[in-house]
Amino acid sequence: MPLSMKCVSGGCGPGQVPLSEQGEPPPVAEEMDPLGAGAGAARVVHSDMGDPGIVKSPSDPKKYRYIQLANGLRALLISELKDGEWGGTAVEADQDYKEEEEATAEPRQEDDEGDSGEGTEEEEEKEEEEVDSDFEELNEEKEAGKRASSEKQSAAALCIAVGSFSDPEDLAGLAHFLEHMVFMGSEKYPAENGFDAFLKKHGGSDNASTDCERTIFQFDVQRKYFRQALDRWAQFFICPLMIEEAIEREVEAVDSEYQLARPSDSHRKEMLFGSLARPGHPMAKFGWGNAQTLKQEPKEKQINTYQRLRDFWKRFYSAHYMTLTVQSKETLDTLEEWVREIFDKVPNNGKPKPDFSHLQEPFETPAFNKMYRVVPVRKVHGLTLSWAVPPQARHYRVKPLHYISWLIGHEGKGSILSVLRKKCWALALFGGNNETGFDQNSTYSIFSISITLTDQGFQNVYEVVHLVFQYMKMLQTLGPQQRIYEEIQKIEANEFHYQEQTDPIMYVENICENMQLFPKEDFLTGDQLMFEYNPQVISEALRWLTPERANLLLLSPEHEGNCPLRERWFTTSYSIEDIPEEWAGRWKEELALNSDLHLPEENKFIATDFELRSLDCPDSEFPVKISSSDRGCLWYKKDNKFKIPK
């Protein structure tokens, strides 16, 4: 199947479902003040309309507004209020929340060490007793609560255009370490774990991640506490304490993440693959960081890790590097007022963003086009063919790699997998480029094909590789096919048109990263839709996918004891061998096409008519039996609630 991916895409192309328009931009009208503020006095009246420049799904009820603050921070506001609902003004919302806090506030203890956000011990014991006594009632409401929980949550995510590529050479993992350290309290809210405790108390959660060129922070919380949580969270980007005494504890947390990742075959493959990059390229860096790189080596080299952390924060955590997404059941005007008031204080250092786009073709080395035999953690045979191609971000409207992955991952007649299965050589196949910085960044894009092999497939691995190369040759010979592109385009457009609403915290995380990649109009569509059929762009991407540019990585427990080499950080056992001359020679010549391989036939089952049929049966509370035989029964219930064509 095609590898699920976050392609870089955006607008409306032929064959797509037309997208709905949003309202007008928020006008500012002048009206005479009926309270008599003086002749000619005016008061500002906002409408709560969304931004018409942002294309959204017709099934998406949310409103969107894009703003840029004076400090350069860019934000997307998402209101979940439906037409006709009124969330009040920002002042009213703030007042409601203040009253709620005052009503539930705990008396301040004299020996409080800080704003932990936690209740008193007596209250916790009382709550435990209440939970015990109400256990049966809570159990009955558990499922209903789960269904409603996402509606109650408000969420925010912030993406910074800096990641592990910016790690200094002598402090591997510093960007990841800083992602941890900024949460160690702030000048306004100094309690070391106050934010986590606040979220825990109010049904929320938070997370963060560091990629090659981006770092993302996100949280969610019950709506009534969103304004307060937003203010607490923002302080990590305004005035974090980054307590020096917390460094050793957080180094252990970073090291723990690294230790948990070590048994993962996917992480081990990535680190081995990154080590093949040419010297000086940031792909070869150890972005995870661990106790060795952040604690032991700095001590030996007399490096002040604390000062370097603060310097890294000042240099890279700048407002003009940041994109923010907030989502809540508030008016857009309320969200805008909150965001401007809170995030306008994030500093802007005025320095240019990190840029690695000049470091292209990192894998143009003799070590790349070889066979790497690896001992995996899992007891499986797996083959991965990888190509490094020029960065594809600028082709997001065409998505050439997505088009190719669709064909590679096709499982029907004439596909790679169908032929391999006939020979009993493979169980599954995935192809494409995923959304991580490892697969797609400003220096290269990776296109890979991963095949789960049978024992027979492992014994005939070069025959399997030969079959893949024959298919790639066929694609290059036949060239891009507009019919196939438009089929994929229609399927993606239909899915986008009728997409279901996702968990707010996942949604804002995705959108804030999209804001780093796409123009405003494509924030919501850029990673989902295919907009323009451009055969030249697709052909250029195909041109790179040749045998002499491929890296072969073969995982198998059969390699145990025959792999003397060790990858430095994940200690993966591997060996390197040249491609056998017999096969290298066959691939250099004109590859003969395999008659068993061909393009997918026309897909006649792509939906085009989405009109809902009128009711042809009475409403029923439960499904009704409409057919029964010795082979089974068929029950039916008409959907009269959601009314979507699924």
Image: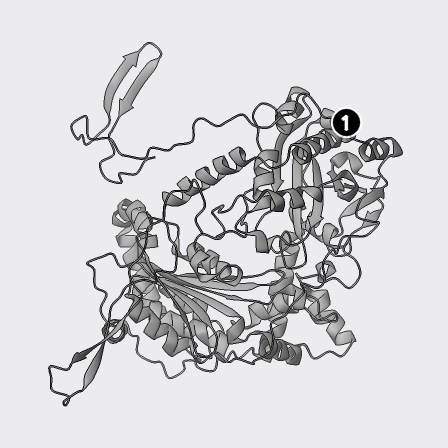
The residue at the point 62 percent across, 59 percent down is: 256
Whether residue 53 can be seen here: yes
The residue at the point 11 percent across, 87 percent down is: 36
Q: Quadrant of the N terminus?
A: top right
Viewer-nearest residue: 207 or 450: 450
Where residue 437 appears, x then y in whole percent?
Answer: 61, 56
Which residue is the site of mark 1? 460
Tell me which amino acid carries mark 1: Asn
Whether residue 122 can be seen here: no
Farthest residue to the top: give it: 630
The residue at the point 59 percent across, 55 percent down is: 393
- The image quadrant of residue 175 is bottom right
Query: Tag 1's secondary structure?
Result: loop
Q: Would you say 439 lies left or right of 105 here? A: right
Viewer-nearest residue: 79 or 198: 79
Viewer-nearest residue: 325 or 571: 325
